[in-house]
Structure formats: structure tokens, C-alpha cells
Amino acid sequence: MERKTKIRAEENCQELIITREFDLPVELLFKAYEDPEIVAQWMGTKVIQLENRKHGSWRFETSHNGQVMFSANGVILDFVPEQKITRTFEMENSPFPVQLEFLEFEKLTADTSKLTMQIIFKSVAFRNQLLQMPFANGLNMAHDRLQAILSGLQ
């Protein structure tokens, strides 16, 4: 099956460019990143905090059998509804330093949209370490869930 979420990693570069086109209006795609209940569904995580505003903060936790397996948090640096979110991302209790994420939401047609994410890492080594993990498959599966859940809301 084709992976619809594309990840571009240029050699010796500290960034990833991630793109995905969705069969969703841009308003609905943006809502998937803005609405805590929808975020929890497609990401399969608990949304502890999500302050959708400039200088707001966010925190997510994923648990298994009552034990927290993954926690992440950050600060929302810029928030323009249906256009862009700029935020930091920090995996708690991991060797990865904070990364910077630029999410841009683009209307393609009345019923389709595109998400472009630029993620900047502290070093090429940290970026490459993340790429050795099942990051690409996990992100593609999450985006597939996002598409399925939001298609049901249309």
C-alpha cells in the first residue's frame, strides 16, 4: 500500500519536510490539529493540555495498562486559524532535544487540502536517529486515521 504521507530528508540537513494531501476541506483539516477530542482520536493519545493561541502550551500522554509510555509537550509560538501553527515539540524522558515545527495548511480545492510540516532538529544526527525509528510508518498511519475520522464528520 502506498504511503500517502511523504517525508523528504535531504542529506546533511537538520530538517524534515513532511507533506500530505487530504480529501478534506482545509477548515476540517485544521480542526484535526485544533480540537482536543479529534486530536486524541487520530493520534491515539490523551490530550492533557492544548491552548490554541500564541504563547499557549500543549501536552499529550499515551498510556498502556495504566502506565504512561510516551509524553510530549511544547509551546505554540504562532497560531493562525486554518493557515498555520508554529510550535516546539519535546519528547519527555528521551535523549531528543526540543525541535521546532512549522505546520502550514493549504486549501487546494473546496474539498481537498494539503498539510506541509517543516521540522527542524538540533543536529543532523538527531534527525537521522528519528528516521531510524518507525516514525514514517507511524505518522502515515496517524494521518490515515485523521482522514478516516474527519471524513465521517463531513
Image: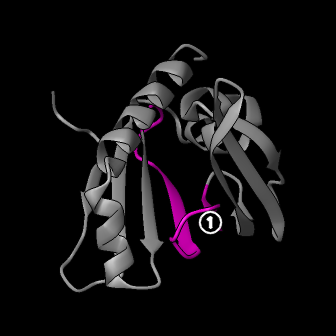
Q: Residue 66 in the image: x percent, y percent? A: 72, 27
Q: Which residues are magenta?
A: 83-112
Q: Is residue 152 above or below residue 101?
A: above
Q: Is residue 94 highlighted in magenta?
A: yes
Q: Residue 62 in the image: x percent, y percent? A: 64, 37
Which color mode does the image show? one colour
Q: Is residue 13 above or below residue 86?
A: below
Q: Which residue is mark 1?
A: 90
Callout 1: few (<14), some (14-19), or many (20+) C-alpha neighbours within 10 Å? some
Q: Can I make out residue 78 in this image?
A: yes
Q: Report the front residue among 30 and 131.
A: 131
Q: Is residue 63 above or below residue 127?
A: above
Q: Is residue 134 highlighted in magenta?
A: no
Task: Give the residue type that dot 1 points to.
Answer: Glu
Q: Report the front residue among 98 and 76.
A: 98
- Looking at the image, which residue is at 55% across and 64% down? 94
